[in-house]
Image: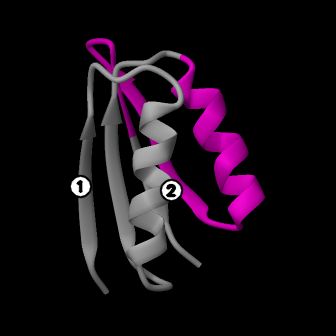
Amino acid sequence: MAEYEINARGLQCPGPIVKLFNQSKTAEPGDIIKIEVTDQGFKKDVMAWCKKTGCDLVELKEENNVISATIKKN
């Protein structure tokens, strides 16, 4: 199992989701992708993206205006 980290701070929609999508294409089932963003719309976007792709949203939190999401590829 691999773990990937994406820094998408400062990017606006659709930048963070595009980075997440591109990383998910190279990830294997069971891999973990962690992404940090500052775009407030990302919370809704990542929930919808996980539902659409079948990935698990393991954790979604916000601290100091930075949204952190942990996604497990299925």
Q: Which residue is at a point 51% across and 41% down the rendered structure image?
A: 17
Residue under pointer 2: 21
Q: Which residue is at a point 43% across and 18% down the rendered structure image?
A: 39
Residue 58 belongs to the span the image colors magenta: yes
Foreground: 58 or 11?
Answer: 11
**x%, y% of residue 45?**
63, 34
**x%, y% of residue 12?**
43, 20
The local crowd at label 1, few if under 14, some if 14 to 19, many if 20 or more residues have their Cα within 10 Å, is few
With respect to residue 45, does 21 lie above or below?
Answer: below
Q: Which residue is at a point 39% across and 63% down the rendered structure image?
A: 23
On residue 47, the disc is: none
Quadrant position of residue 64? top left
Callout 1: SS = strand
With respect to residue 66, does 8 lie above or below?
Answer: below
Residue under pointer 1: 5
Residue 15 belongs to the span the image colors magenta: no
Callout 2: SS = helix
Magenta stretch: give its range: 41-68
Between the C-alphas of marks 2 and 1, the distance is: 13 Å
